[in-house]
Each structure stands twice: as C-alpha cells, then as structure tokens.
Image (spheres, rainbow, N blue to C red):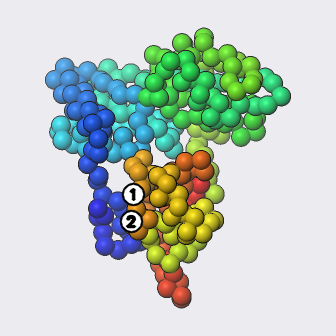
Amino acid sequence: MAYSSDPQTAVRGFIPPQNDDERRLMRRIEELCRIAQEREIPRYTGFLSDREQVLASAACSRAGCTCTRFWGGYPDAERKVLCIEPPDSWQEEPLSVLKFTAFGDVAPTHRDYLGAILGLGLDRACLGDLLQQPDAPGVFYALVLQDKAEFIAAELTGAGHATVKTELCDALPPDLSAGVVRELHEATVPSLRADAVLAAMMHTSRTKAAEYIAAGRVEINHLPLRAAHETAYARDIFTVRGVGRFRLQSIGGKSRKDRQFICYFQY
C-alpha cells in the first residue's frame, strides 16, 4: 500500500477501483484516450475529485497516453478536469469562471451555493472549486465547465435565503488565483493509526475518533475508512461527515517520548 517503509516518506499506494462506478470511470477515460490519440483531437472530462484523478491517471497510463494534464482553473485547485491534448491538436479552454454576489442579511455559505447549482439539475462533475472572496463574505467564485457557464449565469438567481447576481468573469481575481493559504498545525501522536491521527487533527479523544470511524462517518481519500487501526500516510485526506476535512500534510520524526510528529491542515 505504501511506496516506502520509512513513515516520513511513505505515501499511500494506488488503490484499484472499488466499485462499478470507479471501473466505469477508468473505462471511459481509456476510451477518451483512444479517441484523442486516433483522431488527434483534444478530449476533456468533467471535474474530478482527488480519488477520481488518481484513477484517471492510472487509466491514462494503462492506455499508453502521455499527452495529459489536470487543470482546475488555478494552481492549487482541488477538483480538476483531465485534459487529453495530443500534440499539434487545437486545444480548447474547458473551464469558465462565474462570480456570485449575494444581497440580503445572511450571506450564503459554500453549501448554499453548491446546493443552488446542483438544484438546477446539473451533475457534480460540472462544478469545480467554489471560492469565497476573503474580504467580501457575500461574494463567491466558481469554476465550471465552459459549456454550462451561460446556463448557470442565466438561471442561478438565489442561494440560501439571499438573492444572487451571477455573472461570467474572464478570470479569478489575483488573490484567489494565487491559491488559498492554509494554516499548518503541528501535533504529536502515539502512532500513525488512523484513529490516533484523526483524534489529533480534530482535537478530540482517540475513543471519540474511533466512534466516528465505527459509525462510517470517516473517509480517507474519498474511500470509506473501515478500521481504526489502519495506517495513515502523508498527504492522506480525511473527510469526517458533519465535521470537515483534514489533510495530513507531512510526517516528521520522533519526540523524546517516542511520539510521532505530524503536520496537518483543515480545509
């Protein structure tokens, strides 16, 4: 499962497709690779999650396709489109930027905007990252598929309990396109067991973290975490339903008390 026995450098290895949806995704990516290379035309997917990007990379490798890149509209994007662009083909811009400006007493949240967009009958793959303007709580930007941008701009007029003005933009503002600066936190854990690492990141007890896991509320890299004793690796993303997401950014050495140093941030 890991590429190295050294916990400071080990990362989680490739996990094969776990269900029919993941197998279908890999087959679809392989077919897109075949079409792009045979016809020498670009092909693009919808927005992919971290887990889907891993599967897509594996599918491209299996198809022998190297003319690929992932792009989410800015360097630190989480959700990204797979761009398959053969040499000398006419490359397209698959993404557009939308700006949402809310009017009302209560500004819509990330969840409100996500619900409003999906409520238009669109699939999650049509939508990339949703970013809040740091100095303006009522303003959000969204990366969307280019062919869905005008529809969303025309139809989305509200989110949460607020009226919303939606408009197309040429690009993200510079302070957002530069990437989100996240605060790194340090902690020590008795081991790299998933429950111990999760407890440290959530500032809770190991027993409580194990209860979240046993209740099926925790995922690692978009896959269910089935046992508290599973090992955590650097760059693992923990998703705790109803709580939030955490990334185990790096694993350090040992303390004098033989505890493991970790570095993480919360999304």
Circle 2 crowding by C-alpha within 10 Å: few under 14, some 14–19, many from 20: few
Residue at image position (65%, 30%) is: 112
The answer to whether residue 113 is visible is yes
Residue at image position (35%, 37%) is: 69
Which residue matches tag 2?
230
Residue extending farthest to the right is: 105
The residue lying toward the viewer, choosing from 111 and 54, is: 111
Residue at image position (31%, 64%) is: 2
Mark 1: which secondary structure? loop
Residue 55, located in which quarter of the rendered image?
A: top left
Residue at image position (44%, 28%) is: 125
Question: Vertically, is 114 above or below 164?
Answer: below
Mark 2: which secondary structure? loop
Left-right relation of 228 to 86: right
The three-letter amino acid code for the residue at tag 2 is Glu
Residue 63 location, x and y as percent? 18, 37
The answer to whether residue 186 is visible is no
Q: Which mark is residue 226?
A: 1
- Where's the N terminus, which quadrant? bottom left
The residue lying toward the viewer, choosing from 257 and 250, is: 257
The three-letter amino acid code for the residue at tag 1 is Arg
Residue 220 location, x and y as percent? 43, 54
Circle 1 crowding by C-alpha within 10 Å: few under 14, some 14–19, many from 20: some
The residue lying toward the viewer, choosing from 209 and 214, is: 214
Residue 15 location, x and y as percent? 29, 52
Question: Vertically, is 196 above or below 183?
Answer: below
